[in-house]
Image (cartoon, helix red, strand yellow):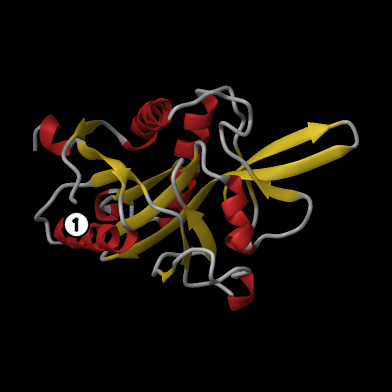
Amino acid sequence: MNEAKRRIGWAVSPGLTDYEPAVAAMEARAGAIAAGEAGELVWLLEHPPLYTAGVSAKPEDLLDPNRFPVFKTGRGGQFTYHGPGQRVAYVMLDLRTRGRDVTRFVADLERWLIGALERFNVKGEVREGRVGVWVERKAPGWSREDKIAAIGVRLRKWVSFHGIAFNVEPDLSHFGGITPCGISGPQFGVTSLVDLGLPVTMSDADAALRAAFEEVFGATETIAPPL
């Protein structure tokens, strides 16, 4: 196999992409990868405001069920929010050629996100028992850990789908309709690059995500999105 065929497809959809057709296209592509009929793909997009419920979601964590549409999803995790200003990346990689190690795969997703944050001089960290990437925020007499990126994946025939959600400039008040990922308490919150005072555009974030991804997973090539 030559180098071009080994490269991972990298697709970006402009504007907002509706959730249900995106999931259908993602699952179809993952199935094609498993069947050897398509190459690996990372698909970047933004959704309209909505909540998704992972397989571990608890009904009591949906605090405002009438605020935005709610979709049940087969990914791991609990409730999360997607919306404008948040970069969602659906990650369709073939773990049959990557060690068949789910724990390592999730750790690699975390390393990817931490590497992207480093490009903006933001220190992203992981915490035992709390999947995702966190930013520690401190001031005199005040300390909090805010989540800046969520991870929720599923595997079928050792091909991954779903992926990550990276907060660039979403409306953070929209997270108030759920208990994000089932984690509550005054010491925990949600943040974004812009909330941290960084004038980052979505294009800036995409460039950082792509460069950091290639350091962890390998070379990419730009292709058309599946939808």
The residue drawn where x is 45% and y is 55% is 49
Answer above or below: position of 27 versus 105. below
Q: Amino acid at mark 1?
A: Arg
Whether residue 63 is visible, yes or no, is: yes
For label 1, the crowd category at 10 Å Cα-Cα, with few meaning under 14, some 14 to 19 and many 20 or more, is many
| 98 left or right of 28 in image | right
Q: Residue furthest right?
A: 141
Taking the view exactly as shown, the residue that stands out farthest to the front is 66
Q: In front here: 164 or 112?
A: 164
Residue at mark 1 = 29
The structure residue drawn at horizontal position 50% and vertical position 23%, both measured from the top left corner, is: 119
At 42% across and 57% down in the image, what residue appears? 102
Q: Secondary structure at mark 1?
A: helix
* Callout count: 1
**Residue 163 point in image, percent of width and height:** 39, 52
Q: Looking at the image, is 174 positioned above or below residue 182?
A: above
Which of the 4 quarters of the picture holds residue 220? top left
| Residue 185 % position (x, y) | 76, 57
